[in-house]
Image (spheres, rainbow, N blue to C red):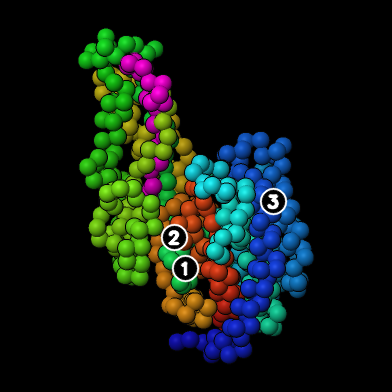
Amino acid sequence: MIPASFTEMESHLNTTTLQATVDACWNEEIVPQLIDYIRIPAKSPHFDPQWASNGHIERVIRLAEAWARRQPVRGLVVEIVRLPGRTPLLYFDVPGTGDRTVLLYGHLDKQPEMTGWRDGFGPWDPLLEDGKLYGRGGADDGYAVFAALAAIGALQAQGIAHSRCAGMIETCEESGSYDLPAYLDALAQRLGEVDFVVGLDSGCGDYQRLWATTSLRGMSGGTLTVDVLTEGVHSGDASGVVPSSFRIARRILDRLEDAATGRILPPEFHAAIPAERAEQAGKAAAILGDGIVAKFPFIGTTRPMVGDRAEACLNRTWRPALSVIGADGLPPVADAGNVLRPRTSLQLSLRLPPTVDGNAATVALKRLLEADPPHGASVRFDGESGATGWNAPATEPWLAHALEAASSRHYGMPAAAMGEGGTIPFMAMLGKHFPNAQFLITGVLGPHSNAHGPNEFLHIPYAKKLTACVADVLAAHAARSAG
């Protein structure tokens, strides 16, 4: 049953006025700020170890702080919080009605440049084309702090109640959010009990409706190194006697992955798929159809790994998968002489089901890869810290209704939900920190938006409607509190 306060809220909130207020804020305030933001190469610390002296992260957080302070949001307090030796965090706090607290999350650090940008486009060269703002970080997810405060401001402009809203905008998310736990601890007393978390750093299946992310995969990985010689030798002399380091690496990977199908073999890297998530995957597949695979730039006659669209959705959200993302010891083709190389190093990225512990998986991966080396070769796996995924708690009726109503109002289409294949470490952190909270994890990373790759773009019309949807859901949260 929908509480009476929901209906009362809906009757007072003017959808047209709300969307017009949000649109004006985006046109006049947010887009110009994002253009300035994209120009700053604020790469995450993993990609810019000298981030503190280079000053780019400082520039983007001060840009966001200055914009936030100018916003006509009643009671807004804005502060850059700094812990020794850590990246800074932008914190804001807006008082509201009732005794509940909403936490809104985003980040300002960025992925590196990447090659392959279209002529005239670039990671630090913002460009507007057909309603899309191209450039690194706008969609992933520099827009978040601006959208969050715009949503709150739009509610206040209509006199619609919202709960207290606190914001945490970090600057090392693209490096694994390793500073976030320290800030959660440092700000714990100020935050208090949080019962609703809104994260604006995820994706959308299409640009026609509000999408909620219900799960995220975890990740394990590291560098597999195989050494067979102290130095390279003539392949005509040594081949057939000295084992190839590449072949040994290939054999070792066969322990982990079926090369014919891509299936990960050891059971410890798998998890049972909850019935609710399988049902959501089926519904998402029905909505998106071929779009689930058509969004990827396949070349020539390359086909997807599976034909069933629901299975494709589950493959990218609930099943483990291996990617070899880098290599050392292999010279460029133009420089490759007839040498049996002494070493092959492969950088491995193993995506994990949401409920598999990332650190335990890394330990298991090291044990699997280093055991009983073929030909007695020197085999070493240098594992990186694993990241555990996230599976959302069961959605409470008030939130399910709010998402459906918001999507119908602003997009004219029902809401949808599905898991995402990426790894966002902060979600597991927030889930652990606020075990009783409800979550709306959403975002603007839809088809072809290409976060982390070339030609990343922010779909501005979609982002405007998403901002209005967030406002609707914040109003529903406050109405639920009053009910």
Q: Is residue 284 above or below residue 8?
A: above
Q: What amino acid type should be assigned to the residue bearing mark 3?
A: Val
Q: How much space separates mark 2 and mark 3, taking CA atoms?
A: 27 Å
Mark 2 surroundings within 10 Å by alpha-carbon count, few (fewer than 14), some (14 through 19), many (20 or more): some
Q: What amino acid type should be assigned to the residue bearing mark 1?
A: Tyr
Q: Which percent across, then down, holds residue 263?
A: 26, 46
**In terms of sequence position, does the residue under pointer 3 or pointer 1 come before the other?**
3
Q: Give the residue at x 46% y 47%.
A: 387
Task: Specify the segment rendered in magenta.
Answer: 332-358
Residue tagged 3? 60
Q: Secondary structure at mark 2?
A: loop
Q: What amino acid type should be assigned to the residue bearing mark 2?
A: Pro
Left or right relative to 146: residue 200: left
**Residue, far front:** 119
Is disc 2 in contact with disc 3, using a CB cutoff of under 8 Å? Answer: no
The part of the image, by quadrant, that contains residue 90 is bottom right
Disc assigned to residue 207: 1
Q: How much space separates mark 2 and mark 1, taking CA atoms?
A: 8 Å
**In terms of sequence position, does the residue under pointer 2 or pointer 3 come before the other?**
3
Q: Secondary structure at mark 1?
A: loop
Q: Nearer the viewer, mark 3 or mark 1?
A: 1
Q: Give the residue at x 25% y 54%.
A: 306
Labels in figure, total: 3
Q: How much space separates mark 3 and mark 1, taking CA atoms?
A: 28 Å
Q: Is residue 456 above or below residue 166?
A: above
Residue tagged 2? 447
Is disc 2 in contact with disc 1, using a CB cutoff of under 8 Å? Answer: yes
**In terms of sequence position, does the residue under pointer 2 or pointer 1 come before the other?**
1
Q: Which percent across, then down, holds residue 198?
A: 56, 66
Q: Give the residue at x 58% y 90%.
A: 11
